[in-house]
Image: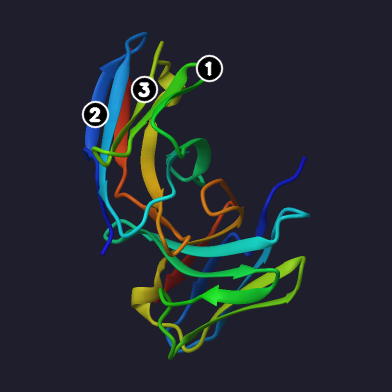
Amino acid sequence: GQSLEQPSEVTAVEGAIVQINCTYQTSGFYGLSWYQQHDGGAPTFLSYNALDGLEETGRFSSFLSRSDSYGYLLLQELQMKDSASYFCAVTGSSYKLIFGSGTRLLVRP
Amino acid sequence: DARVTQTPRHKVTEMGQEVTMRCQPILGHNTVFWYRQTMMQGLELLAYFRNRAPLDDSGMPKDRFSAEMPDATLATLKIQPSEPRDSAVYFCASGTEYEQYFGPGTRLTVT
C-alpha cells in the first residue's frame, strides 16, 4: 500500500523559517510534490522533486531523500499569507498522485 | 489566463437526487483528475482520464458514481442517487501525474 505522514499542525512567527516534513511508503516511486491550500480554496502546486536534493523556488524550497523515503518543504521569511495547509503527495507506480493528510501552518505576528 | 473551471460552485440537494458536476480542463492538458475532499478522509482521487479515456476509477463508488469526458473540453462527474455521505468538496484538476492545476471545486451538500 501507500502511506504518507506529515505533522498535522505547525505554528511559526512571521519572518521565521519553518520546515514541514513528510515521510512516505509507496510501491514504486516517481517523485514527491507539495501543494498549498488556503481555507476555502483549491490546492495549488508548489514544487516537485524526482531526484535527491534541494529545489529552490523563491522563499520556498523542497528537499528529497529517496533512500530515506523522506522529504521536506522549507518556507523562509514567513508571511501571514503563508498560513494555509500544505500537502505532500507521491507519484507511485500507478502514476496516481496520493496526498498526505496535510499540515496546517499558522503564522503568528 | 489558463485555469480549470468547474460548475456549479455550490450545490445543495436532497438525498436520492441526481447530481452532475462539470469541469473544463486547461486547454492542451490531456490528463484530467477528479478528487473529493472531506475533513475525515482528506483529498481522495476518484478517477482520472488521459486523452479522454478513463485510466483509473478505482477510488469511485461504482454503484452510484460515474465519470466521463464527452470531449476534450468537458469532464463530468455524476452521482445518482446522492446520499448524505457524499457531502464534500469535489475538485477537478488537469496537468500531469505530479503537477496538477485544480479548479475552484464544487461544494456539495446532500440533505
Q: Residues within 10 Å of mark 3 (few under 14, many from 20)?
A: some
- Judge depth for marks 3 and 2 and give the one in front: 3
- Of label 1 and label 2, which has the lower sequence position? 2
Using the rendered image, report if marks 1 and 3 lie on a common chain.
Answer: yes
Task: Tell me the distance, in whole angstroms, between the alpha carbons under discs 1 and 3.
Answer: 11 Å
Discs 1 and 2 share one subunit = yes
* Subunit of label 1: A
Q: Which residue is mark 2?
A: A10
Looking at the rendered structure, the kind of residue marked 2 is: Val
Residue under mark 3: which chain is it in?
A
Q: Residue visible at 69% across and 73% down?
A: B52
* Above or below for B42 versus A57: below
**Closest to the observer: B83 or A3?**
A3
Q: Quadrant of residue B8?
A: bottom right
Instruction: Provide residue B43's location: percent of width, then percent of height.
Output: 39, 57
Residue linked to disc 1: A58
Please tell me which of labels 1 and 3 falls first in the chain: 1
How far apart marks 1 and 2 lie (CA) works out to 21 Å
Mark 3 and mark 2: Cα distance apart in space: 12 Å
Q: Which residue is drawn at the image coordinates 29% and 49% (left, top)?
A: A101
On whether disc 3 and disc 2 are found on a single subunit, the reply is yes
Which amino acid type is shown beneath numbered disc 1?
Answer: Gly
